[in-house]
């Protein structure tokens, strides 16, 4: 390219960036080219950090329990919205009928006027008489017209039991399919690395859901599956570059190639994930209570997924390489 | 300029125009009369409000019922042939027969073989000569398993159609479930009663004389059946166990006006066989009470005053109009082959639906604005092209929902928002690659060429994997979650079409006109 001063061919140039440098290209850059962060060297520390976090999350889930939605455990959920902010205690106090003894009331809006009342357990709460009881109690305590029943859901026992199993199966199947696909496109060890990274993301998200007391329902499973499908993006980008560099740099060790590749692709992994995280954050903040836990799971999953393609998938590949070399 | 650029460009313009044509009825209401497409985007129950009911079909019960019917038929045949049986009873799915006279065994076996093709003998090693046992033919059991859900589906569909709700959905799910969706229905009580009713109509004689026994000690072959509760009072009836006729001989039922104090009545019309049977029954039992039993409850038990040979009858149950209307509805459409159990019930009020749409659209506007701005600032010229592709992407994606009649749910809207965030991934990969090639000193044209070529592998692989997880999600989920899976997969297709192939047309156009000195990425 010669240093002629013809106008930029595409669109109008951004202010202050139009000086056409003869050879030097000037881009707006997040990560300048030539960045060399020693990701591979950090892998053991990160390994420890990752799996400790997961262990904490799982332990939390085990001890504190998961905030299961009625999709999974059966029961009844009534979602009400009051015209004016109402103390949650008033809502709790309204539920007097004996079968509502174990009703959970949760504030779901931001304005303190939206509540979800849940009676969990299919035996106690899986029939429409429970929702009728809740509605009757609300009618007695609050003036008709000052509140609105937005949603009523009742789930019997059979659905919940089947659902837990098929959800686990679906997530595992998706992970496996991703792993196999990557193994076929690249090499077996890349596939193994990708699958482990995905499992890492799912477990991490699961733990985050438990710690944040987010409701775990059908849409949360949808979010987990989406995380599995999307986290592979970054892994693909990095693996693709590793493969390319392995052809170019035959002399270098895999660890070096990996470090170079991760650094070279860092800006694109961050940007691609960044845009996905941006829209998910919009959903989380603005999407409303119905998809709150869905958006939360996506948000956490995408963030963790970006990290794991760098710190989980690649070290696994490296570890498998080491084993191969020793043999 | 190469022709290929023109052709591809024209294709995208055509796609955009088509999407707009499909979308106008969703946003302009009413659409102009001459508009070629009329169907707006179908909204899921979570967005428009309504009731979602999930029923389980009790197939095992249907099989038991069939065994019961065979048993009753067998009893009738034995009576006709004057073969005395000490007992005929059902144990699980076998019919056990004890003959009074052992010598008739061969005759009974012959009878069953001739007239009961669905029964097979069960060999019982320690049985006495007068004992026989039969069970349903395995093929018949399989046929029931295959058909019961379909039959129930058909009957419920008819009941719902006559219930009068706009655009209901009645669908089979899995092998033994039925989904009913009623848009706009907030109080599903009446609908639930209509759907959940088995509507098995039976005619039985009220027992009389010393054989009847009392409510606490009913006589042999006599059963206690509760009557309909009236004004809080519930009477019980002593009925002869034997069913004289069932509702399957009904051809029609309608609401009629009863006498002054008895409210509405339900008139029914019998088919030829039913007319004959009913004539015989009523002739033989003039003066006795005939109980009309619906799903195990006596609706009424009028005294037979004259033989009824016209094939018409009526049920007096002190109904109000809707009760009578619903009863006529279920009788007309026949009894369910198996009881239904309500497994899941979800009702969404219209205000929440509106609210969800508003919040979904808001997240979309904010999310996409952020992404568009980022691309613009970061990639400048390349960002403009990518943003144009993004606009077309959304247009095609939403247009596809209108064109193919997919249902848009709240997770579906979330899927569209998510597609925005993922669609630009391809552009990011391509543009980053172009930058890299430019840094290596390639001309813009060569850099663009290499950028598309090298980035393609990563784009393809990452989209294939997301598509796969979308398919698995579709397989796993139901309702709104499926809506999300559809959006996800569809979004991948439109993203590839616009973000990769669409932007390529623009770059090809730019590089074909003149020698490009620089490219803004």
Image (cartoon, rainbow, N blue to C red):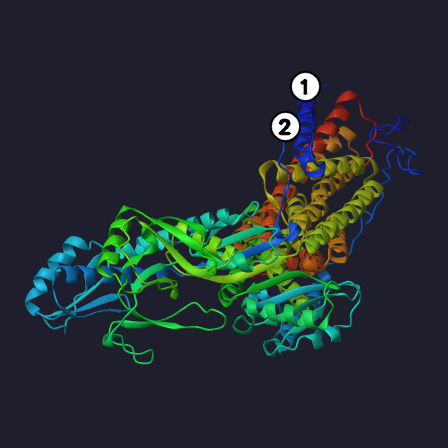
Q: Nearer the viewer, residue B114 or B185?
A: B185
Subunit ID for the residue under disc 2: B
Picture quadrant where residue B447 is located: top right
Do pointers 1 and 2 mark residues of a single chain?
Answer: yes
Q: Residue at x 27, y 46 (%)?
A: B272
* Separation of marks 1 and 2 at Cα, in angstroms: 31 Å
For the question of whether residue B473 can be seen, the reply is yes
Q: Quadrant of residue B91?
A: bottom left
Q: Position of residue B241 (x, y in %)?
A: 27, 68
Out of B378 and A242, give the one closest to the viewer.
B378
Give the quadrant of residue B214.
bottom left
Dot 1 falls on which chain?
B
| Residue denoted by label 1 | B3
Quadrant of the drawing holding the N terminus of chain A: top right
Residue B428 numbered tag: none
Dot 1: element: helix
Give me the disc on residue B36: 2
Asked if the residue at tag 2 contacts the one at tag 1, i.e. Cβ–Cβ closer than 8 Å, the answer is no
Q: Where residue A73 appears, x then y in whole percent?
A: 56, 69
């Amino acid at each position: 390219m010669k240093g002629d001063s013809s106008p930029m061919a595409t669109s109008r140039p951004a202010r202050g960036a139009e000086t056409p440098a003869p050879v030097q290209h000037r881009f707006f850059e997040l990560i300048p080219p030539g960045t060399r962060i020693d990701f591979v060297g950090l892998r053991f520390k990160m390994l420890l950090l990752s799996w400790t976090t997961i262990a904490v999350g799982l332990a939390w889930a085990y001890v504190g329990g998961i905030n299961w939605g009625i999709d999974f455990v059966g029961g009844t959920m009534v979602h009400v919205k009051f015209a004016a902010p109402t103390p949650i205690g008033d809502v709790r106090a309204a539920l007097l009928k004996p079968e509502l003894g174990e009703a959970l009331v949760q504030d779901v809006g931001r304005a303190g006027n939206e509540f979800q009342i849940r009676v969990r357990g299919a035996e106690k709460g899986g029939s429409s008489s429970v929702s009728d009881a809740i509605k009757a109690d609300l009618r007695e305590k609050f003036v008709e017209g000052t509140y609105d029943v937005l949603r009523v859901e009742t789930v019997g026992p059979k659905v919940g039991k089947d659902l837990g199993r098929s959800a686990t199966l679906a997530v595992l199947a998706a992970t496996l399919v991703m792993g196999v696909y990557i193994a076929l496109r690249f090499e077996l060890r890349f596939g193994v690395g990708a699958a482990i990274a995905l499992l890492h993301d799912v477990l991490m998200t699961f733990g985050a859901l438990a710690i944040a007391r987010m409701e775990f329902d059908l849409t949360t499973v949808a979010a987990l599956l989406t995380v599995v499908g999307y986290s592979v993006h970054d892994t693909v980008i990095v693996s693709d570059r590793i493969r390319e560099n392995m052809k170019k740099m035959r002399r270098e060790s895999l660890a070096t190639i990996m470090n170079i590749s991760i650094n070279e692709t860092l800006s694109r992994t961050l940007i691609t994930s960044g845009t996905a995280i941006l829209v998910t954050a919009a959903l989380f903040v603005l999407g409303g209570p119905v998809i709150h836990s869905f958006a939360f799971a996506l948000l956490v999953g995408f963030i963790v997924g970006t990290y794991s393609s760098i710190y989980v998938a690649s070290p696994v590949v490296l570890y498998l390489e080491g084993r191969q070399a020793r043999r | 300029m190469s022709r290929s650029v023109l052709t591809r460009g024209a294709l995208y313009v055509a796609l955009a125009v088509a999407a707009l044509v499909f979308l106008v009825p969703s946003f302009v209401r009413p659409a102009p009369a001459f508009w070629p497409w009329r169907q707006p985007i179908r909204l899921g129950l979570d967005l428009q409000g309504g009731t979602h009911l999930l029923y389980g079909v009790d197939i095992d019960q249907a099989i038991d019922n069939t065994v019961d019917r065979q048993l009753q038929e067998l009893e009738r045949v034995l009576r006709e042939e004057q073969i005395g049986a000490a007992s005929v009873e059902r144990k699980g799915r076998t019919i056990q027969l004890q003959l009074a006279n052992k010598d008739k065994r061969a005759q009974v076996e012959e009878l069953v073989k001739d007239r009961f093709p669905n029964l097979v003998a069960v060999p019982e090693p320690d049985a006495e000569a007068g004992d026989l046992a039969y069970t349903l033919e395995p093929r018949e059991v399989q046929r029931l398993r295959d058909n019961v859900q379909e039959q129930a589906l058909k009957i419920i569909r008819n009941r719902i159609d006559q219930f009068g709700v706009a655009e209901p959905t009645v669908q089979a799910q899995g092998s033994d479930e039925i989904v009913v969706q009623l848009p706009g229905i907030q109080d599903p009580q009446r609908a639930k009663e209509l759907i959940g009713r088995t509507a098995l109509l039976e005619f039985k004689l009220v027992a009389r004389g010393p054989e009847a026994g009392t409510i606490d000690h009913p006589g042999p072959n006599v059963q206690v059946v509760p009557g309909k509760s009236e004004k809080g009072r519930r009477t019980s009836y002593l009925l002869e166990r034997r069913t004289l006729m069932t509702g399957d001989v009904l051809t029609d039922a309608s609401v009629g006006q009863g006498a002054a104090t008895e409210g509405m009545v339900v008139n029914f019309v019998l088919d030829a066989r039913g007319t004959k049977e009913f004539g015989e029954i009523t002739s033989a039992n003039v003066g006795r009470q005939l109980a009309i039993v619906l799903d195990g409850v006596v609706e009424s038990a009028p005294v037979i005053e004259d033989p009824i040979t016209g094939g018409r009858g009526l049920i007096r149950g002190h109904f109000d109009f809707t009760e009578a209307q619903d009863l006529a509805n279920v009788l007309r459409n026949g009894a369910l082959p198996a009881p239904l159990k309500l497994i899941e019930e979800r009702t969404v009020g219209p205000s929440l639906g509106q609210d969800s749409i508003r919040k979904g659209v808001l997240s979309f506007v904010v999310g996409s604005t952020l992404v568009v701005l980022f691309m613009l600032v970061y990639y400048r010229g390349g960002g403009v092209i990518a943003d144009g592709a993004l606009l077309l992407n959304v247009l095609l994606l939403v247009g596809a929902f209108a064109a193919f009649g997919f249902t848009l749910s709240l997770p579906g809207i979330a899927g569209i928002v998510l597609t925005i965030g993922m669609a630009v991934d391809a552009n990011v990969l391509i543009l980053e690659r172009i930058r890299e090639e430019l840094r290596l000193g390639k001309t813009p044209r060569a850099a663009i060429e290499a950028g598309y070529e090298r980035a393609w592998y990563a784009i393809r692989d990452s989209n294939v994997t997301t598509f796969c997880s979308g398919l698995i999600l579709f397989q796993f989920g139901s309702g709104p979650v499926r809506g999300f899976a559809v959006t996800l997969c569809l979004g991948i297709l439109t993203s590839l079409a616009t973000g990769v192939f669409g932007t390529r047309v623009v770059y090809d156009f730019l590089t074909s006109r003149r020698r490009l000195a620089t490219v803004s990425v």
